[in-house]
Image (cartoon, rainbow, N blue to C red):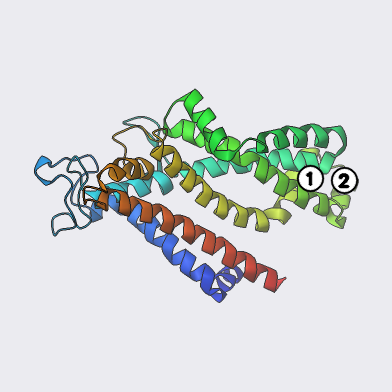
Amino acid sequence: MKNTLTILFSSKTATIGLILVLFWVFVALLAPYITSYGPTQQDWKASNQGPSIAHPLGTDELGRDLWSRLAHGARIVLIIMPISEKFWIPGGTAIWGVIAALFCGASLGLISGYKGGWADEIIMRFLDAMMSIPVILLYLIIVAALGASAVNVVIAIAIVGTPGVARLVRSLTLDIKTRDYVRAAETRGETLLYILFMEILPNAKGPIIIDAMLRVGYAIFAMGTLGFLGLGMPPPSPDWGSMVAKGREFILMGNPWASLWPSLAIASLVVGLNLLADGLREESMRYQ
């Protein structure tokens, strides 16, 4: 833990990224306590208002407080995943999507890299076929087929992210499987699962963790894109992408706030994650 913190704070890039990410994490955690309105609470007398004392970031076309919707939208991205109107589970939608992609991709990459031969050919050719489809088109096909919901967005993120994770894990496995400790485990007669998940995967965790940070940023950007296209979280959920889509209708009317703030939120969180991952990667390579 100490070495990780040393590497983290040795990089200005990683530190700036961490500050941006922690800001939104704290906003998500404290959303019910730092907002004066509910995310769906409407004030018809204050629709499309600019920043004011009552509404620090202004309001949208329905008079809903933009700061409240941004804060509760951060909860959906980073802290909770709504399954239904009254039921949710811990962990943001983007987080669960990346976790699912890591599980599927790591499993396929480990098998492909360790076994080789026909297993490697079948798995990698299938994943190559998936990667040949444009990412946005693949997202649209999956969500349009399954419907707009948090669970289906997670499924889409997992399916789109699996090929990239698998290719990374496969390349790491090809190197690690030649190490002496793996050969020793094979000599002891350890099972395939033990070798893959106890010997190879733990020794490949560094690049995988850094890649996962980048993928969370990609997932957040994908959620914003799907929300903008009307295929994200169903209304009246405070989805940042749908907020941008609705707010852009009023930009030419002199009310850019409903579109500006969620755009900045998406950009700052994604940039923060990318800076954090890039900084950690640069510093970890320096310590090798």
Rendered image: mark on residue 251: none
Q: CA distance from mark 1 to mark 2?
A: 8 Å
Q: Secondary structure at mark 1?
A: helix
Q: Earlier in the sequence, mark 1 or mark 2?
A: 2
Q: In the figure, 160 relative to 217: above or below?
A: above
Q: 89 and 189: which one is in front?
A: 89
Front-most of residues 145 and 137: 137
**SS for dot 2:** helix
* Residue at image location 52% in from the left, 64% down from the top: 275
Of the residues shown, which amino acid type is indicated by label 1?
Ile
Percent position of residue 33, x then y: 24, 53
- Work out whether 151 lies above or below 99: above
Question: What residue sits right under mark 1 in the picture?
Answer: 195
In this rendering, would 193 be left or right of 95?
right
Please state which amino acid type lies under the numbered disc 2: Glu
Q: Position of residue 30 (x, y in %)?
A: 30, 54
Q: Is residue 167 above or below residue 211?
A: above
> Where does residue 247 sit, x and y in percent of width and height?
28, 44
Quarter of the figure with the C terminus: bottom right
Task: Check whether the beta carbons of the residues at disc 1 and disc 2 lie within 8 A of each other.
Answer: yes
- The residue lying toward the viewer, choosing from 287 and 66, is 66
Name which quarter of the figure residue 179 lies in: bottom right
Q: Which residue does the image show at 56% across and 49% down from the upper left?
A: 215
Q: Which residue is mark 2?
A: 186
* Snapshot quadrant of residue 206: bottom right
Residue 132 on image: x %, y %: 67, 37
